[in-house]
Image (cartoon, grey):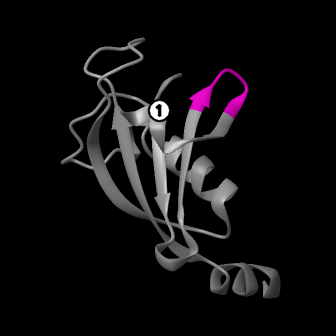
Amino acid sequence: MMIKVLSKRACIQYDVTIFQTPKYREYKGYKEVYRTTIPANNRQHCLKETFSRFNVTDRIPANYKGRFLTTGDIILIDEGRSGQFYYQLKPGGWYPINRIMLL
């Protein structure tokens, strides 16, 4: 019980933006498709939570217009003054990338 209370308190609201290309498997033309906040303990936890929220039909927000998260999709985690962190989904997981990939 106590562990659950402690881990709840450690949750941060991460500002997450999802970028996808118009068609699956394209590598150019990324557009912002959704922005939300994800409660998580750290960035890695945030990436896992984002993936499960947008890949499980019952958990997808009603106003989400994108597709399931797939290889090639990019997530921006904006931590305000701490910086902006971009991750791309590749086989084997999320990998940090440079913002230039979006251009």
Q: In this view, does 94 lie to the left or right of 25?
A: right
Dividing the picture into quadrants, the one containing residue 46 is bottom right
Q: Where is residue 50 in the image (x, y as percent from the top left)?
A: 50, 49
Q: In this view, does 55 lie to the left or right of 45?
A: left
Q: Where is residue 103 in the image (x, y as percent from the top left)?
A: 36, 33
Q: Is residue 49 left or right of residue 63?
A: right
Q: Is residue 57 magenta?
A: no
Disc 1 marks which residue? 101
Please tell me which residue lies in front, 87 or 4: 87
Asked if 101 appears above or below 3 in the picture, the reply is above
Determine the secondary structure under disc 1.
helix
Q: Does the magenta stretch include residue 92?
A: yes
* Residue shown at 53% from the left, 41% from the top: 51
Q: In this view, does 99 lie to the left or right of 48?
A: left
Please tell me which residue lies in front, 82 or 70: 82
Q: What are the residue bounds of the magenta stretch?
A: 89-93
Q: Judge the density around disc 1: few (<14), some (14-19), many (≥20) Cα neighbours within 10 Å.
A: few
* Residue shown at 74% from the left, 86% from the top: 6
Q: Position of residue 16 (x, y in %)?
A: 42, 57
* Residue shown at 46% from the left, 37% from the top: 100
Please tell me which residue lies in front, 67 or 61: 67
* Residue shown at 50% from the left, 58% from the top: 77
Q: Position of residue 33 (x, y in %)?
A: 26, 41
Please name the predominant secondary structure of the magenta segment in the image. strand
Asked if 49 appears above or below 55 in the picture, the reply is below
Q: Callout 1, which amino acid?
A: Met
